[in-house]
Amino acid sequence: MKALGRHILVEFLNCKADVLNDVVQIEKAMVEAAQIAGATVINSTFHHFSPYGVSGVVVIQESHLAIHTWPEYRYAAVDLFTCGDSVDPWVSFEFLKKAFDASYSALEMNRGSTHVMKKGSALQVKPNDAENYDPTKGYKINRNVWFTDKDENQALSLRYTGDILFDERSEFQRVRILESYSYGKMLTIDDMVMCTEKDESHYHEMITHPAVQAFQSVQGPIKNALVIGGGDGGTIRELFKYKTLDKVTMVEIDEAVVRACKLHLPTISREFSNPKLDLIIGDGIKFIMEAQKEAYDLIVVDGSDPAGPAKGLFTKEFYANCMKALKPNGVLITQGESPMFHAQTFVELNGCLKSVFGQNNVHTMLFHATTYPSGMWSLQLAIKGQYNPIQDVKKDQVQKFVASLTGDNALKYYNEDLHSAAFSLPTFVKQMLNS
Ligand code: SPD
């Protein structure tokens, strides 16, 4: 190509009027149009005008897609501007034509024809090194960038420096490590925050210690644990604070997550070298289907949200298999999503676990997940036995354990008071679970 970019000016005519006035649908279509063409979406902003019309832009790593609609004329003016060879703007065009059910006229222009320009040296323009991407170093976007974890109506955004330390599309998902301004490095999967250096302790301590402490109060030292997911290594780091463990088996589906975290998040992933760890890169759902009966004291389900490969971690079949693989008095703990952000999944997962483990054997905990949407996150603790993780826990034992951890091992979130506090639920959450 003898130009820096390709710019298609499109007149979409005879479009569906209701679509052209629906800001949510338009934004979704424009973002998908970018993604389907292989572009990397940086951000999008869309606005609805009263009474009719939508304007918006999707900023992509390779330039932008923009739209202005006049629903009363069933008309949309669209700009599809891409740079480089990796993205074909006509793929976005085809997608939008279908989405708006439109007829069209379109004109393609080359932008920045190189034969009329000379590359200057005086400006010292810093190259974007994304094209020479090296997973040990990453690359930088020289822009003002936000990472946004959102659904259609709510979002949590963290501003990051533009340093993208790791960025790979694995067989399952897009795995990135970004440098944020306020929370240190963060692991993201697709468009969701998985953990950040600053607040990962909240999640990893709470998904581990309440369950182990409850188990140990009744059954004695923990020996054998299984982690499904947990590819960043934070959960096994917490587990290996129990020296009585003979073995921890961890089944993570995506080796890219483990590799990324070993490279860039050493404080989280430091126990991957522990000789008591049996790390299996494979499907946890299949693993548990074939697992030995009554093998584990503890099963931790440290998965992602119920989209992509983690979907199967929210089913009755999966938990029935977990129940079989637990020893008598064994404990299962799973991340339970947010009562505010994923109300339905939160309630359904609790019901699903009760149907497997029994109505009185499933206990909900809440904790502060400051970088997950809504900031309010849950864990579900299920017991294969007849004891209670709050009343039967030996508080002095918890206190002793917490006090014994010093230096790098010291806990930042969990303690003996929080053990029972985490099970105290706000009224609206109790009502959600009883309805
Ligand atoms: N929305 C985020 C839910 C992610 C739960 N798992 C995080 C992995 C941390 N080990």
Image (cartoon, helix red, strand yellow):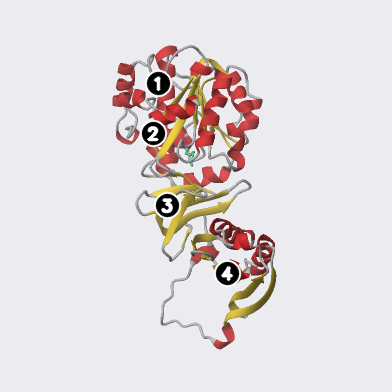
Q: Which dot, 2 or 4, sits closer to the camera?
A: 4
Residue at 57 percent of width and 61 percent of height: 21
Instruction: Give the image quarter of residue 279.
Output: top right
Q: Does 100 appear above or below 301?
A: below
Kindly identify the amino acid type of the residue bearing the numbered disc 1.
Gln
Q: Of the two numbered discs 2 and 3 on the same chain, state the one appearing first in sequence.
A: 3
Q: Secondary structure at mark 1?
A: helix
- Which element type, helix, strand or loop, lies under badge 2? strand
What element does badge 4 sit on? strand
Give the SS element for disc 3. Answer: strand
**Vertical placement of residue 311 versus 248, above or below:** below
Give residue 403's quadrant in the image. top left
Q: Return the residue found at the far bottom.
A: 116
Contact between labelled residues 4 and 3, with CB atoms less than 8 Å apart: no
- Mark 4 or mark 1: name the one nearer the start of the chain: 4
What residue is disc 1 on? 213
Q: Label 4: which residue? A: 70
Find the distance from the CA under tag 3 to the CA under tag 4.
31 Å
Q: Residues within 10 Å of mark 1 (few under 14, many from 20)?
A: many
Q: Residue at x 52, y 45 (%)?
A: 259
Dot in front, 3 or 1: 3
- Mark 3 lies on residue: 157
State if disc 1 and disc 4 touch (CB < 8 Å). no
* Disc nearer the start of the sequence (2/4): 4
